[in-house]
Image (cartoon, rainbow, N blue to C red):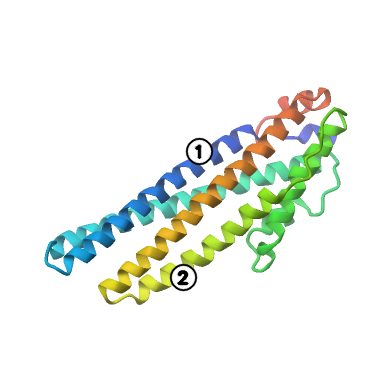
Amino acid sequence: MENLLVKDNFLRSKHTLILFAILAGTDLLSIGLSYYQNSVLKAYEYGEYSDEYITNLDYATMFLAIFKFICIISLIVLFIKWFRRAYANLIRLDIGMDYTENAAVWGYFIPFVNWVRPVKTMKEIYLKTQKAIKAYDSTLVLDQNTSFIVLWWILYIVNGVVGNFASKAMNRATTIDEFIDANNFYMVSDLVDILSIALAVIVIQKISKLELSLKKTDRSVSLIDQIGTQ
């Protein structure tokens, strides 16, 4: 019976949410450090700080950026694993999906395709998981509002654009004023990232809640709980 291949997704969602929280904390630290660095750079013009202090502050910024990069890479891995299982579970339940499991995942990485397919497949998961529950619980009221998913993806794309602009501004910077301006762009990018993370958390929590509801249905309990991880 093919439905026995359905996998539990709770731990994957939990680990992804934890890493999102860590990344949001890193963004807050980055904002605070950038703000402080700007104040130091302004005072440096008047001789209030030494070159050594400025260099040490640059090292702190660099170490935080490296830590953030590690968090982002780890989060991509965890998020994709969670997403893949959520999408594949619906396929395993014989629900008609628009894409194959691999096509849904690669939709996050193929240029231009990754502007639209992620939001389409995430909406698919949200809506079709509800329909799967509805098949066993006729009292369920379907929620067709997917605007929070669209907004999450828009903010994610905007954050990428602003972050790229900030990176280029920092690479071009040669004066204190230019470094301050680049830091300001980074702070905006971090703020947008925090908003994107907040919406991503909402997306995952809503879908995870639906997955748990599906798990509680008579048919799904026996199917999901018997299976190990993949």
Quadrant position of residue 48 = bottom left
Q: Is the residue marked by circle 2 packed among few (<14), some (14-19), or many (20+) residues within 10 Å? A: some
Query: Looking at the picture, which amino acid does disc 1 mark?
Result: Ile
Q: Residue at x 27, y 76 (%)?
A: 175
Expressed as whole percent of the image width and height from the top left, the position of residue 106 reads 68, 58
Q: Amino acid at mark 2?
A: Phe
Residue 146 % position (x, y): 73, 48
In depth, the one of 195 and 7 nearer the eye is: 195
Q: Provide the residue designation for mark 2.
A: 165
Q: Identify the residue at image location x=68%, y=54%.
A: 150
Q: Residue at x 74, y 29 (%)?
A: 213
Q: Earlier along the polypeptide chain: callout 1 or callout 2?
A: 1
Q: Secondary structure at mark 1?
A: helix
Decide if residue 224 is on the left or right side of residue 194: right
User: From where the camera sits, is residue 230 visible?
Assistant: no
The mark lying in front, picked from 1 and 2, is: 2
